[in-house]
Amino acid sequence: MNTNLPTLEFILKNYKNFNSRATKDALIAYWRHIEKGGKMFWTVAGAMSSAQLGITLAPAIREGLIHGMSVTGANLEESLFRLVAHDSYKNFPDYRYFTKEDDTNILKNRMRRVTDTSIPEDEAFRAVESLILPVWEKATKEKTRKFWHEYFYDLIQVIDKKKHEGKAEECWLLAAAENNIPMVVPGYEDSTFGNIFASHVKLGDASANIAKSGIEYMGVFYGQYQKLSEGKGVGFFQIGGGIAGDFPICVVPSLKYDMKIKTKPWAYFCQVSDSTTSYGSYSGATPNEKITWDKLTKDTPMFIVESDATIVAPLILTALLECKAHPKDANKLIEKYAT
């Protein structure tokens, strides 16, 4: 075994068919795109931050394997929670056997269950609220406006390191903020802090105007996409479905048909999701359907991995980090196992 590339070699050697083959092919195409100077845009739905995807996502951002992101408001805030309240999380490996009474007891203990783990109400939600509310109040007083993620970018970089319970190197939000990578957070109102913000607006503590809208996000993303797509283009790596993926992928046809601006299509597409293909399911639609919407072309490398992203994404990211550290060895290994 190549000791510098154990994960890459494992995937190349063992992943031959079905979803494993799709994983391998998506990995190789990703690496080749990056190696040629291309960029990659990630969309993150689900509860990936609570599932600690940052363990591999953060170093991937720092190593230049990810150049922009679209995330749900929940994933944004939950990355911060994992940094400041990690020790107060509780795991529930037997959650499949829980009764309604079991979950009621979790509620009484001021925990919010997310499948087999939980977010602590006081140590996470309320602790961060006490930090960000003064920021919202100040913005209201000064009549300044920012995008939703910018408030979190600013906050996470000024939090006292003594308050870190999680590992800073495993916090993808911190990595993204430090590198100031382009980000959109569509539908951020549908998140716990979206609700908290709404409550303070209703109470008169903050103005709704201090948070820029989703329409403004798209307006800025027009320019960000054009810059990202320069040279070899920018790929699209999607985890899950929903608005995190649906919102940014539409930038290409919108630039072309609405803005009348000639633009490149996405240079790569991969979706890791357990959403089944069904009538009317956008998240479960095959990539070919996106050709008809002018988001992808018949020449775009396309991959669908129908599997759990908490299994697939860390494997792909770890292999990519190995490739980045040892590119010559990685290419030799890929050629060795080429089929």
Image: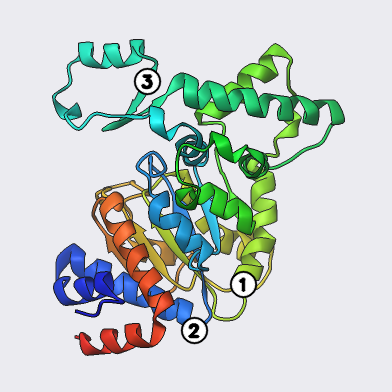
Using the image as rendered, state which of residue 261 and residue 318 is in the foreground: 318
Q: Nearer the viewer, mark 1 or mark 3?
A: 3
User: The residue tagged with tag 1: helix, strand or loop?
Assistant: loop
Q: Determine whether the residue tagged by mark 2 lies in a helix, strand or loop.
A: loop
Question: Given contact means CB atoms under 8 Å apart, are the residues at marks 1 and 2 in contact?
Answer: no
Q: Earlier in the sequence, mark 1 or mark 3?
A: 3
Q: Amino acid at mark 1?
A: Thr
**Residue located beneath label 3 in the image:** 111
In the picture, which quadrant includes the C terminus?
bottom left
Name the foreground residue: 9 vs 263: 9
Which residue is painted at 22% across and 89% down in the image? Answer: 336
Residues tagged 1 and 3 counted as in contact (Cβ below 8 A): no
The residue nearer to you, when weighing 183 against 9, is 9
How far is the residue under mark 2 from the one under mark 3?
46 Å
Image quarter where the N terminus lies is: bottom left
- Residue 34 at x, y = what percent? 47, 76
In the picture provided, is 92 more to the left or to the right than 288?
left
Q: Residues within 10 Å of mark 1 (few under 14, many from 20)?
A: some
Q: Which residue is mark 2?
A: 36
Q: Which numbered disc covers residue 263? A: 1
* Secondary structure category for the residue under label 3: strand
**Residue drawn at 46 percent across, 60 percent down:** 59
Task: Give the answer, above or below, for where 65 lies relative to 200.
Answer: below
Q: Give residue 148's position: percent from left, percent from top.
A: 64, 39
Badge 3 density bin: few <14, some 14–19, many ≥20, Cα 10 Å: many
Image quarter for residue 150?
A: top right
Q: Nearer the viewer, residue 35 or 44?
A: 35
Label 2 neighbour load within 10 Å: few <14, some 14-19, many 20+ = few
Image position of 284 with respect to 224: above or below: above
